[in-house]
């Protein structure tokens, strides 16, 4: 037999064996290690390396490379994840400047580009970098940089992430939802792009905010990234610039309204809860017109909440209670605080409702208490107020349509109506309908000036000068609007005009202010990221049927307001550092779980039924009331000091209940 014939027979035999092996491999799945737990992988070879969910790059061990047909497809040196991160961080510092699209591209956006590319190719490493450097990168993946990302998303889009349900998909959403590859989804963040931060209608580009929020769910709450889903409901846009932009990625038609709009959102909710009955849906950045209506429409039927209305309110309440402590008063004095609120949108009204409920609960929780609490707020329609002078000049508005909201105003937003001041009240105070923010501050002399207006610079020099007459020995200024350019004032302006002895908080990050003589003016970031990951995690673990007001209030009042030590509060520090976000999330989740049990909403998680949850809660409180607590803490290696048992200031003891649940639930692996 010729050598040629023999080689042909051998080649044919080898081809048959290879085909047989390929057929065998196509029906097999492989097990690798992901985060110290086995993960079933139904892919191999280049498909693994091209899938960010499973790709580990040079960190694949030689055994994994053989099992997954990766040998020869990667450089031979196996690197640890620590070495990978070190190399990436070095490259990030070096490449950030080179990644800029010229001098107009901010440095933060360049960082986002590089992090996003890592997210596209190696999700595990991306979250390791984010978790390890959360204080540095949270402002990149979330506010304020995410606002810039959303404004430019059509140009930045490289790889799809999340799902898009549009008005053109009506009647198809029930089948569309099965296009998502994950069999189980725990968290959805959905937006319609109508009010992204304080930037207005950004249409389909608003999906960037949903992606950023879910990054924090993973980094702060440990939610499995394969079980989160960012969603955009594209019902069009009223942004004329986007409607004329040939590169815009969304529907280029005006927004749906009325019943047509409701029908689209209804169909979406029915579809996702049909496929994933236990999913939690967070509504994000819906315009005020729809935020409250959709919340009331779905909250008693589905596991959902609106972060702008409820999350912002919770963080603000925690800060307001912290400000009371910083003024040297007990938190029970909160109902005595005079609060001027600039902004009557969804966030502003959400904070007002939550603050009123908190005050009323402290003084009796009856109709009289609610009326008394109402009288502590002065609401200024701030966005219009700033434009009043120009508007009056051109005859567009009358004085009665802006400024201080009173019962004299026509066509008051129904959600703001409970806070409209009575005519007799304001006359006694020397005010009138439509009074400017500066006039209100000057006459009321408030303890707190709270900005939720999305109007940058609204707290002008005139307003801040008026606040110097506050009856409080330590007035508090909350410039909570995002992104940074929409903050009502900067900390430098606040400290330099009002004085050193103030409390300052903002929604976006600012640097502390050097006041001289070794004194520091602390800038507290009162961001929703302190609450929403814990709300989601607590709801998930409790299996609560709905997310109640009590669960949200417990998260803010029971934990955040008491998290700071007395020494920190005296210095004007009323919010914790973002570097503590994972501990904060655990504490918030503990409060949410306990409240869900107390309200008989909990249905259990996985193999833990409601009765077992309630039993754990009873054990927790029994331990709290006995000396067995110290023994249990010792045996479970839990950090304990006798001082931690104070009901008002404890941070450690409040984690015990969740720790019990963790022993049963989290230890099994939330990410399994």
Image (cartoon, helix red, strand yellow):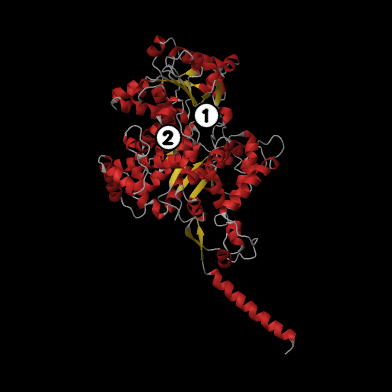
Q: Within 10 Å of the Cα at label 1, are there few (<14), some (14-19), or many (20+) other Cα atoms? A: many
Q: Within 10 Å of the Cα at label 2, are there few (<14), some (14-19), or many (20+) other Cα atoms? A: many
Q: Mark 2 points at which residue?
A: 310
Quadrant of res 133: top right
Task: Check disc 2 and report its element: helix, strand or loop.
Answer: helix
Contact, CB < 8 Å: mark 1 with mark 2?
A: no
- Measured as percent of width and height from the top left, residue 505 is found at 49, 27
Q: In which quarter of the image is the C terminus?
A: bottom left
> Where residue 117 is drawn, which disc sits there?
none
- Measured as percent of width and height from the top left, residue 97 is found at 69, 40
Q: From the viewer's side, name the closer residue of 407 and 587.
A: 587
Residue lying farthest to the bottom in this orientation: 1
Disc 1 to disc 2, C-alpha distance: 15 Å
Q: From the viewer's side, name the closer residue of 530 and 635.
A: 635
Q: Is residue 448 visible?
A: yes
- Measured as percent of width and height from the top left, residue 224 is found at 48, 51
Count of numbered badges drawn on the protein: 2
Q: Is residue 248 visible?
A: no
Q: Describe residue 337's horizontal placement relative to residue 224 as left or right.
A: left
Is 477 located above or below residue 286 in the figure?
above
Task: Check disc 1 and report its element: helix, strand or loop.
Answer: loop
Is 157 located above or below residue 327 in the figure?
below
Q: Describe residue 411's horizontal placement relative to residue 330 as left or right.
A: right
Return the disc, 1 or 2, that comes first in the chain's sequence.
Answer: 2
- Measured as percent of width and height from the top left, residue 606 is found at 37, 54
Q: Describe residue 607's horizontal placement relative to residue 480 as left or right.
A: left
Q: Describe residue 361's horizontal placement relative to residue 574 as left or right.
A: left
Q: Name the residue under label 1.
A: 481
Quadrant of res 250: top right
Q: In which quarter of the image is the N terminus?
A: bottom right
Q: From the viewer's side, name the closer residue of 370 and 471.
A: 471
């Amino acid at each position: 037999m010729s050598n040629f014939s023999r080689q042909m027979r051998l080649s044919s035999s080898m081809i048959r064996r290879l085909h047989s092996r390929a057929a065998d491999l196509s029906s097999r799945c492989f097990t690798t290690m992901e985060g110290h737990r086995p993960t079933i992988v139904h892919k191999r070879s280049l498909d693994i390396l091209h899938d960010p969910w499973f790709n580990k790059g040079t960190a694949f061990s030689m055994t994994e490379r053989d099992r997954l047909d990766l040998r020869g497809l990667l450089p031979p040196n196996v690197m640890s994840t620590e070495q990978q991160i070190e190399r990436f961080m070095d490259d990030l510092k070096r490449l950030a400047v080179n990644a800029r699209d010229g001098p107009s591209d901010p440095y933060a956006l360049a960082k986002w580009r590089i992090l996003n590319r890592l997210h596209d190719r190696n999700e595990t490493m991306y979250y390791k970098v984010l978790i390890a450097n959360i204080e540095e990168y949270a402002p990149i993946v979330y506010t304020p940089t995410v606002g810039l990302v959303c404004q430019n998303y059509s140009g930045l889009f490289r790889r799809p992430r999340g799902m898009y349900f549009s008005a053109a998909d009506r009647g198809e959403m029930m089948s569309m939802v099965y296009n998502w590859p994950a069999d189980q989804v725990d968290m959805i963040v959905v937006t319609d792009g109508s009010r992204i931060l304080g930037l207005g209608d950004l249409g389909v580009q608003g999906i960037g905010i949903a992606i950023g929020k879910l990054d924090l769910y993973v980094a702060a709450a440990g939610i499995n990234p394969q079980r989160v889903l960012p969603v955009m409901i594209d019902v069009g846009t009223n942004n004329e610039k986007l409607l004329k932009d040939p590169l815009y990625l969304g529907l280029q038609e005006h927004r749906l309204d009325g019943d047509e709009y409701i029908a689209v959102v209804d169909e979406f909710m029915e579809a996702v809860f049909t496929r994933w009955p236990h999913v939690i849906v967070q509504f994000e950045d819906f315009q005020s017109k729809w935020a409250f209506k959709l919340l009331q429409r779905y909250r008693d039927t589905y596991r959902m909440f609106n972060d702008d209305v409820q999350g912002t309110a919770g963080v603000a309440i925690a800060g307001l209670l912290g400000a009371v402590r910083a003024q040297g008063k007990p938190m029970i004095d909160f109902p005595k605080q005079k609060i001027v609120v600039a902004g009557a949108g969804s966030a502003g009204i959400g904070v007002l409702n939550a603050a009123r409920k908190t005050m009323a609960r402290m003084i009796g929780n009856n109709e009289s208490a609610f009326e008394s609490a109402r009288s502590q707020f002065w609401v200024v329609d701030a966005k219009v107020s700033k434009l009043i002078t120009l508007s009056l000049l051109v005859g567009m508005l009358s004085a009665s349509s802006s400024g201080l909201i009173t019962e004299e105003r026509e066509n008051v937003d129904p959600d703001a109506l409970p806070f409209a001041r009575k005519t007799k009240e304001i006359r006694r105070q020397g005010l009138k309908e439509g009074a400017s923010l500066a006039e209100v501050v000057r006459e009321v002399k408030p303890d707190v000036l709270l900005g939720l207006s999305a109007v940058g610079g609204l707290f002008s020099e005139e307003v801040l000068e008026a606040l110097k007459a506050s009856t409080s020995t330590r007035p508090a200024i909350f410039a909570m609007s995002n992104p940074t350019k929409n903050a009502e004032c900067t900390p430098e302006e606040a400290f330099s005009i009002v004085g050193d002895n103030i409390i300052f908080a903002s929604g976006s990050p600012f640097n502390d202010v050097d006041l001289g003589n070794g004194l520091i003016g602390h800038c507290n970031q009162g961001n929703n990221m302190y609450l929403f990951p814990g709300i989601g995690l607590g709801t998930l673990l409790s299996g609560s049927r709905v997310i109640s007001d009590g669960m949200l209030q417990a998260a803010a009042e029971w934990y955040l307001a008491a998290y700071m030590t007395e020494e920190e509060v005296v210095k004007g520090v009323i919010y914790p550092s973002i570097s503590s976000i994972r501990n904060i999330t655990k504490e918030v989740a503990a409060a949410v779980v306990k409240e869900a049990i107390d309200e008989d909403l909990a249905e259990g998680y996985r193999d833990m039924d409601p009765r077992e949850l309630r039993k754990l809660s009873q054990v927790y409180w029994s331990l709290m009331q006995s000396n067995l607590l110290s023994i249990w803490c010792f045996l479970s290696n839990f950090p304990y000091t006798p001082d931690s048992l104070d009901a008002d200031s404890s941070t450690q003891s409040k984690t015990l209940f969740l720790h019990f649940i963790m022993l049963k639930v989290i230890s099994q692996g939330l990410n399994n």
